[in-house]
Image (tube, rainbow, N blue to C red):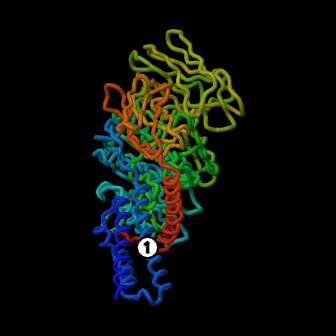
């Protein structure tokens, strides 16, 4: 009997020890007991102590007790670090000017490209009360690995499911319903005669949606004219003030939508006074084909400069516009990321397998201004096709199927015999010009090394070597007309893909974000071992950051944040964490980040948990791809 008394005492001591450990982890044992697994462990512990006599089976009982205690500690420890490593604590604020009260449209070719292009940014707009519309140009039904007669409806259902995760209501999702790929014996729809009906790779000839979600213009023939008009009309129907659209990516349907959007946008700008903010970005280059860099270090990495295949890129990487993303999408535990859960809905595309490449600390775009004065100006040229000069198009391709990687057909090229090589621009009245922007031909075989802009008062400006992403020349003059004269060039020829003139500097909503030494956006930042970390301020306007215009605050007395030597210096002792707030003086615009300096053991455990979850989620991602596809709604 005394043995049982000793066992009961042992049980009480062990129970108190576990309860102490439980309390030290910040949990309440009563709540944990609701978990069936923990309940089973406690019952096993009780059985081991009470039911097995101390004098018999001592080794067996000791092993059982030890296993129960270890399992209990592992479970609680795992849960503790899971809590610490889940989605970052939302400590950001002050993004209203960028994200609030907007009507936003995201134009992409395939169901899942909206996440590749703008995942994390969509949620930021929604969080701040903006309306977001997602427009898919195709139904993604051209994958020969699947039953193409059903794939379109599958992907429509997947898109509705995925976007519900991000918070986009189904009524704000638009399917234009065009085919994904075309009969190989003919032209691509973008290059086909205006009213010629084409057959898609899936064997269809008309736009379609699902039974409960019809296409924007249901049962429209697959023609160039209908495709062009549908894009134009969907923009004019909703008139978003901000448009995100795919650019000339490594896929023909991406390329077709990019060019068709710019063609339609050019028509809208010439016919109406509507002037939205336009951002172009990539689905392959910066997402689907990018390196898998998610959680490879202590902190989430930003998008890297990466080119895949035969990408034609006109933009300068250093001029990119970086958007901070929704904090719930950037998680050390990949499965806690909202973007990962949305990608998991695209099981037909195995999209979750690309989560590590797609999810980054920022999203990258290039802003295209729509307020050029030249859409309604009179333009004449010494030779060549003047219609190419002010049509909003930077790239164009006359044959996507055979020359898709050479989009150099949208260039004004003067004749070889033309000695003048000049463009003459006339306004209907005297017009103030702040700047003129010239876009060099994207072809690697030709480059303008100098051009002259000559105003009607005789003033001349030399441009120097032109860039494909645009070379801006400050004018600051009121004129009735001006000329552009190509003076020198290299290569087989010369030409311009676009010219623009503006009456004022670009006025884009400012973005300010704290970054680490490598330029990665900071959210929940684990600083290197030590107590000091220098942060820089990112500013999207291109102007030099004036640190004197900012103030910085820290919410913990044990930590400190100051602006010093053109950086934000944060002191955070070992084992401490704090919230650092950056604010533009006399403004509501600010940034907030969480800064942590874990001790060595905690740091290793956090990283161990983070990497373990990456591997675990990879297995989970593979498992998800084997599940049946979502059915169309």
Q: Residue at x 47, y 48 (%)?
A: 598
Q: Nearer the viewer, residue 120 or 599?
A: 599
Q: Residue at x 31, y 48 (%)?
A: 127
Which residue appears farthest toward the bottom when viewing the image? 56
Q: Nearer the viewer, residue 60 or 553?
A: 60
Q: Residue at x 50, y 84 (%)?
A: 59
Q: Secondary structure at mark 1?
A: helix
**Measured from the top left, where is residue 565 in percent x and y?**
51, 25
Q: Nearer the viewer, residue 354 or 109?
A: 354
**Measured from the top left, where is residue 54 in percent x and y?**
42, 86
Decide: is 190 above or below 500.
below
Decide: is 18 above or below 407.
below
**Measured from the top left, where is residue 139 in percent x and y?**
43, 61
Question: In the displayed structure, does residue 52 sit left or right of residue 443?
Answer: left
Disc 1 designates what residue?
A: 69
- Please say whether residue 208 is visible from this viewpoint: yes
Decide: is 289 above or below 61.
above
Q: Quadrant of the C terminus?
A: bottom left
């Amino acid at each position: 009997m005394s043995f049982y008394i000793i066992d009961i005492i042992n049980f009480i001591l062990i129970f108190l020890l576990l309860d102490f450990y439980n309390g030290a982890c910040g949990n309440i044992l009563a709540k944990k007991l609701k978990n069936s697994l923990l309940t089973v462990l406690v019952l096993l512990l009780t059985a081991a102590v009470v039911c097995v006599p101390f004098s018999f089976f001592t080794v067996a009982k000791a092993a059982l007790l030890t296993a129960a205690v270890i399992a209990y500690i592992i479970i609680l420890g795992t849960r503790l670090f899971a809590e610490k490593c889940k989605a970052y604590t939302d400590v950001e604020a002050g993004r209203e000017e960028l994200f609030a009260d907007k009507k936003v449209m995201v134009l992409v070719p395939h169901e899942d490209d909206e996440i590749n292009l703008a995942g994390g940014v969509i949620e930021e707009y929604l969080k701040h009360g903006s309306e977001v519309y997602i427009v898919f140009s195709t139904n993604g039904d051209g994958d020969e690995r699947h039953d193409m007669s059903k794939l379109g409806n599958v992907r429509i259902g997947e898109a509705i499911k995925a976007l519900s995760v991000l918070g986009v209501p189904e009524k704000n999702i638009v399917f234009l319903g065009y085919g994904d790929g075309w009969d190989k014996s003919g032209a691509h729809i973008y290059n086909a005669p205006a009213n010629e009906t084409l057959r898609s790779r899936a064997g269809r000839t008309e736009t379609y949606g699902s039974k409960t979600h019809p296409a924007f213009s249901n049962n429209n023939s697959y023609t160039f004219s209908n495709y062009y008009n549908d894009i134009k009309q969907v923009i004019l129907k909703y008139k978003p003030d901000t448009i995100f659209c795919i650019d000339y990516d490594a896929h023909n349907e991406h390329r077709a939508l990019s060019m068709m959007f710019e063609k339609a946008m050019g028509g809208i700008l010439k016919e109406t006074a509507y002037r939205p903010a336009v951002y172009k970005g990539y689905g392959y280059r910066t997402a689907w084909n990018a390196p898998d860099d998610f959680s490879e270090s202590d902190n989430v990495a930003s998008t890297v400069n990466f080119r895949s295949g035969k990408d034609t890129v006109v933009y300068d990487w250093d001029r990119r516009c970086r958007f901070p993303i929704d904090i719930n999408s950037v998680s050390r535990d990949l499965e806690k990321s909202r973007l990962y859960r949305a990608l998991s809905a695209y099981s037909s595309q195995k999209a979750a397998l690309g989560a590590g490449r797609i999810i980054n600390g920022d999203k990258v775009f290039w802003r295209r201004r729509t307020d050029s004065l030249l859409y309604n100006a009179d333009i004449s040229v010494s030779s060549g096709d003047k219609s190419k000069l002010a049509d909003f198009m930077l790239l164009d391709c006359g044959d996507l199927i055979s020359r898709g990687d050479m989009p150099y057909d949208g260039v004004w090229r003067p004749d070889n015999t033309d000695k003048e090589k000049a463009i003459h621009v006339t306004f209907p009245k005297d017009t103030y010009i702040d700047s003129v922007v010239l876009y060099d031909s994207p072809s690697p075989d030709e480059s303008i090394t100098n051009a002259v802009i000559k105003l009607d008062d005789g003033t001349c400006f030399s441009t120097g070597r032109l860039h494909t992403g645009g070379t801006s020349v400050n004018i600051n003059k009121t004129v009735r007309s001006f000329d552009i004269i190509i003076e020198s060039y290299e290569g087989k020829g010369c030409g311009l893909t676009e010219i623009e003139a503006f009456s004022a500097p670009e006025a884009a909503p400012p973005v300010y974000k704290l970054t680490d030494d490598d330029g990665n956006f900071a959210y929940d930042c684990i600083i290197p071992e030590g107590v000091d970390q220098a942060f820089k301020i990112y500013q999207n306007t291109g102007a030099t950051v004036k640190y004197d215009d900012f103030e910085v605050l820290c919410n913990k007395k044990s930590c400190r944040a100051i602006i010093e030597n053109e950086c934000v210096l944060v002191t955070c002792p070992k084992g401490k964490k704090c919230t650092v707030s950056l604010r533009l003086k006399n403004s509501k615009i600010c940034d907030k980040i969480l800064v942590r300096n874990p001790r060595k053991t905690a740091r290793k455990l956090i990283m161990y948990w983070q990497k373990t979850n990456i591997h675990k989620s990879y297995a989970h991602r593979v498992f998800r791809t084997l599940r049946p596809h979502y059915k169309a709604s």
